[in-house]
Amino acid sequence: MAAREILHKMKVKAGFSSAPPDTGKGKGKVSKHITHGFHLVKGKASHPMEDYVVSQFKQIDDKEVGLFAIFDGHMGHDVANYLQTHLFENILKEPGFWSEPESAIRKAYDKTDGEILDKVLVLGKGGSTAVTAILLNGQTLFVANVGDSRAVISRNGEAKQLSVDHDPGTEKTEIENRGGFVSNIPGDVPRVDGQLAVARAFGDKSLKIHLSSEPHVEEAKIDDTTEFLIMASDGLWKVMSNQEAVDSIKHIKDAQSAAKHLTEAAISRKSKDDISCIVVKFQ
């Protein structure tokens, strides 16, 4: 573990800091050929960094579980910070997780959103998008997401998106059926009730009646054709296509270096948003 990560954990434990480390790496203890790395860069906005990541392997009994996530907060970082420490905990504690992972993930997403709404006086009225990936024994990947952070897998050099961008324009009918509306002002993106540019998110108390927190969930098998997984906030995907991202790191062996390369590429393409990226290498 890098020195800055150890220092960060000491500060958090002592209550001095809630800022995420900006880079890190690791690998599985059982699945030693699987490595992961992450890198975060604050955008040009005046507010503090609102992205948080989880990138780690966890041993549970005789099973090794890879836990990877990106939480992109809006209207403050407290909801994203809460998700970083509580969402996977809720998923893994959900009865039936090992037998029916997809069902457990859906229930835990809903439960965690309820917790956030109940703690609005502490966490505020902001919200967060999320993309999560759970790797079971290095063989099966369960990806879930709400919002526009994205997960893309590379198989034989071909990019495949495992998440769904929850766009208000695409989900206009569902939003209107809940009593909301989608603004479509020229020069701007579609927004729920003229405010939020994603149709699904955690939190957002004032919009929740019109806003879903139901995740898209997808299962993917890891085989000899699977090279790596990219997870990133929309600060990357606004300026780079899925295939461009895959092509730009296919020759970079170190996962942390690959994640850093992607964030730097997004900055060079004039992305002004917070950018967080995780790369998981399977080979």
Image (cartoon, helix red, strand yellow):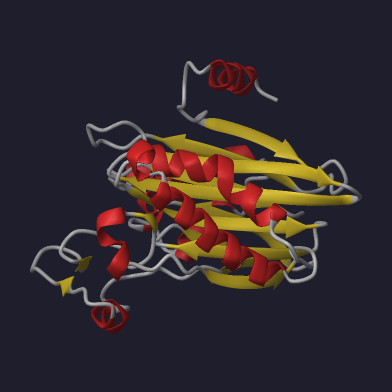
Q: Quadrant of residue 58?
A: top right
Q: Compare residues 121 and 203 and report the one nearer the observer.
A: 121
Residue 115: tell me if it is visible: yes
Drawn side of residue 244 relative to residue 272, left or right? right
| Residue depicted at 70% across the width and 64% down the height | 141
The residue at 66%/35% (across/down) is 25
* Quadrant of the drawing holding the N terminus: top right
The image shows residue 118 at horizontal and vertical percentages of 41, 49
The residue at the far left in this view is 186
Establish if 112 lies above or below 270.
Answer: below
- Given residues 224 and 91, the one toward you in this image is 91
Total numbered circles: 0
Residue at left offset 25%, top offset 56%: 206
Residue 272 position, x and y percent, is 27, 43
The answer to whether 271 appears left or right of 72 in the picture is left
Q: Can see residue 264?
A: no
Q: Quadrant of the C terminus?
A: bottom right
Work out whether 44 lies above or below 178: above
* x and y percentages locating residue 34 in the rendered image: 77, 49
Q: Quadrant of residue 95?
A: bottom right
Residue that appears at 74% across and 43% down: 57
Picture coordinates of residue 73, whole percent (x, y): 37, 46
